[in-house]
Image (spheres, helix red, strand yellow):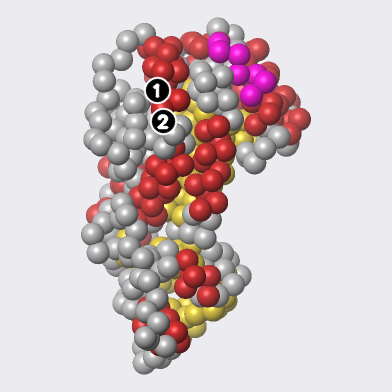
Amino acid sequence: MYNSEIPRKEFLKKSLLGFAGMTVVPGLPHGSSILDQQTAHQMKDYTLKNVKLETGFEYEGDEVVHTKTGLFAVAISNGKIKNISVNKPDDSTAIDAKGWLMLPAFKDMHIHLDKTFYSGPWQATRRRTGGVKGMIALEQQILPEMLKTSTHRAEKLIELLQSKGSAFARSHVNIEPTSKLQSLKNLEKALEHKKDGFRAELVAFPQHGVFYTDSVAYLKDAAQMNIDFIGGLDPYTIDGAIEKTIDFTVQLALDHKKGIDIHLHESGESGLKTVEYLIKKVTENPVLREKTFVSHCFVLAKLDQRKQEEVAEQLGAAGIGIVSTIPFGNLILPIPALYKHGVTVLTGNDSIIDHWNTWGSGSVLQKANLMAQLYGYTSEFMLSRSLKLATGNLLPLDDKGKQQWPKAGAAADLVLIDASCSAEAVSRISSVQSLISQGNIVF
């Protein structure tokens, strides 16, 4: 904390110029630190020097063989990038970025911040019985106890995401008869505590089914609160009716001007029918274009190539996105086909450690790396394009190598990475050295 024996001005100077904060964040790697909240609030205007930015591609023939970079000064003011200028390494008033590569801050677009074991004792998943309905029964038993610590654990999970370069998440939050609205309220407290360094959009998620456990009233209440999307879960398997559940979800979203993000694990005929019916409903209600997503959508991995192309084209035409955790084994999704047809593809960690799964690392850069491995994106160009999975489709260079980020006036949401370029960052899952969110230096 602030030492009263050191003049405040000198204290701030020493803290900021070294990227060295005074508050160590529990849960971050050893040695990581952030600025205390008071200091972060005072950092409205500052300049970063020795910032590595991508400036273009180097070609041999028509092949991209290298990414060009240069060192620049980046001025930040009131949460935005003020300007990018010639680097002045001798500027003693600027914060030294040490030649680290600046990239857009990462976005975890599918996670459950509201129910996690993270920050508690290690717990591997236990043998499942009864499929998803069996897991619903388990949740009904354990959620009352989990809710007692859910705000604290959400905060710790947010800190993990920050340490991996994410300043934004789309979090699904349980809305069902066991939690009622308490899980949402607890998560809102955590997000309020972390608002200077992290933002989120929320999905009202009927984890126990819309009608299977009669979550309708709670979803209607949640739709009037601070949520952004109406969620869903396997309408045929859980609720026993595709059209009834989708119709309710779509109407609730329309009534309250929300988006839609539905969990769909069903990989057989019911999964395909659900996707096709959702495409129909969004086509009928174009206000939902670019605001509707299917999470997981495992059925796409089970279709033959011709059908995959057909459905990908329909999804693109309807403006429906896919949010994937990049599964492998027998569930490799046709992401190249989705990109080909203009489908928005996002990713997230889903579960870091909870009663569903224990595989999440907190890094969406790792997800980009996994995608590149699965689809053979080994070239400089394709590795650099793969970064968009981690950033929510924002890249420093466009496909022609023209610089499109950062730009003056853009939000100061960025990471500094120990890498020479985007391609290397994806290939090596390069370490995050600093995260800046809305102009606030998080660490």
Residue 17: which quarter of the image?
bottom left
- The residue furthest front is 4
Q: Which residue is at 24% across, 28% downward?
A: 124
Relative to 274, is 18 on the left or the right?
left
In space, the residues marked 1 and 2 are separated at their CA atoms by 6 Å
Residue 430 at what x, y percent from top left? 27, 58
Secondary structure at badge 2 equals: helix
Amino acid type shown at disc 2: Met
Residue 112 at what x, y percent from top left? 45, 36
Residue 277 at what x, y percent from top left? 62, 18
Q: Which residue is at 37% across, 79% downward?
A: 3
Q: Is residue 94 above or below residue 271?
A: below
Q: Which residue is at 43% across, 68% downward?
A: 36
Amino acid type shown at disc 1: Ile
Q: Quick check: marks 1 and 2 in contact, CB under 8 Å? A: yes
Residue 270 at what x, y percent from top left? 51, 11
Q: Nearer the viewer, residue 22 or 206?
A: 22
Secondary structure at badge 1 equals: helix
Q: Is residue 23 above or below residue 287?
A: below
Q: Is residue 163 magenta?
A: no
Count of number-bearing discs: 2
Tag 2: Cα neighbours inside 10 Å, few (<14), some, or many (≥20)?
Answer: some
- The residue furthest right is 255
Q: Which residue is at 54% across, 17% downward?
A: 209
Q: Nearer the viewer, residue 437 or 386?
A: 437
Numbered range of the magenta stretch: 212-218
Q: Nearer the viewer, residue 1 or 194?
A: 1
Residue beneath label 1, please? 142
Q: Is residue 217 magenta?
A: yes
Residue beneath label 2, please? 146
